Image (spheres, coloured by chain):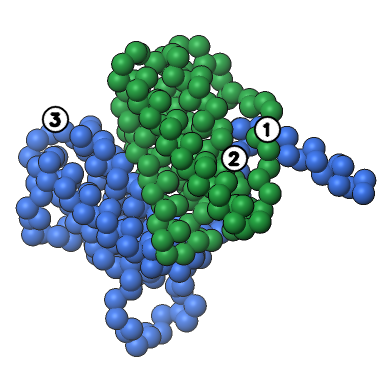
Amino acid sequence: MKEELASALAAEDAAIWAYGLIGVHLKEGSEQDQARAAEDLHRVRRDDLVEQLAGLKASTAPTPAGYELPFPVEDRATALKLAVQIEDGVAQAWRVVLPVTESTQRVDALSALTDSAVRATKWRKLAQVTPLTLIFPGRPTA
Amino acid sequence: MLTGAVRMSDSGHTRRRVLGASGALAGLVTLSGCGLFGDDEEPPKGPDALQPVLDEALALASAYDRVILADQSLSERLTPLSQAHRAHAAELARVIGTTLPSGAASAAAGGADTVAGLRTAELAAQKTAVAACKAAPAGRAALVGSIAAARATHAEALR
């Protein structure tokens, strides 16, 4: 379970980092607010995971110094595209936690998966990408 | 001692790798319990715990189809959601080891035949799937969890 939680932590860290880039390219007001709220929620999940891993006496790997962007983010369209990709990635990381957890801990992991999937749908809506939903959120598509 | 130093370089993973990290595990999660004993009929042990999730998926798919039939202008928006429910039903049937009823299964109108009604039904169905995911054995948790999340995204898409 440590490994799966550590992957979720890495995904949350990546999301926090990415939203720093995404926000500045979005429209001021509700879009930027939405990005800020998403970043805050990823921070909450991240902090929870750090606590859980500490409880399991697992060392949390330090945040990698450099992330690679999958594509340049230089305008609203690419920022929204990255936001969708980030949330899909976080959903994937949490889905893997489901089989290795039980009961309320599994429900918490499912909440994280679901929240990311719903945010991905919101970003697709803003980006006018269709379809707005994935058939199996969190399942790797490749 | 040297290997310790060499291993350190493994932690320099990129975000790209993080995003794809779960890929290798995905194939493992749907080990179904079907077909081991051929076609011999086993004594029925009561409905499978995922049967209600499957029934709901089919009922939702039919409800979408009725709404689309009544208003074709909604087709582009709603058809992917209807298809998603059928894909869920197909996977659930495979995992349960049952076959899907052919043809129009639920002739009875569900009373949810408006977009708002569909949204309410999605949120109710999400709850069913969350409960089923919580109770599921490890091998089924990822599939049912994805279905629960999908229902939440459908509700969001209908807003």
Asked whether disc 2 touches disc 3, contact meaning CB atoms under 8 Å apart, the reply is: no
The x and y percentages for residue B52 are 26, 66
Which residue is the site of mark 2? A10
What's under tag 3, amino acid-wise? Ser
Report the residue that reaches farthest toward the bottom: B43
SS of the residue under disc 3: helix
Mark nearer the viewer, 2 or 3: 2
User: Which residue is at a point 38% across and 63% down the rendered structure image?
Assistant: B134
The x and y percentages for residue B33 are 46, 72
Asked whether disc 2 touches disc 1, contact meaning CB atoms under 8 Å apart, the reply is: yes
The x and y percentages for residue A45 are 47, 43
SS of the residue under disc 2: helix
Tell which chain the image draws in blue.
B
Kindly report the distance in space between the C-alpha atoms of the residues bearing marks 2 and 3. 43 Å
The x and y percentages for residue B61 are 22, 50
Q: Residues within 10 Å of mark 3 (few under 14, many from 20)?
A: few
Image quadrant holding the C terminus of chain B, namely top left
Q: Is residue A112 left or right of residue B49?
A: right
The tint chain A carries is green
What's under tag 2, amino acid-wise? Ala
Which residue is the site of mark 3? B73
Kindly report the distance in space between the C-alpha atoms of the residues bearing marks 1 and 3. 48 Å
Q: Are marks 2 and 1 on the same chain?
A: yes
What's under tag 1, amino acid-wise? Pro
Q: Nearer the viewer, residue B73 or B13?
A: B13
Can residue A141 be seen?
Answer: no
Q: Nearer the viewer, residue A131 or B49?
A: B49
Kindly report the distance in space between the C-alpha atoms of the residues bearing marks 2 and 1. 9 Å
Asked whether disc 1 touches disc 3, contact meaning CB atoms under 8 Å apart, the reply is: no
Can residue A65 be seen?
Answer: yes
Which residue is the site of mark 1? A64
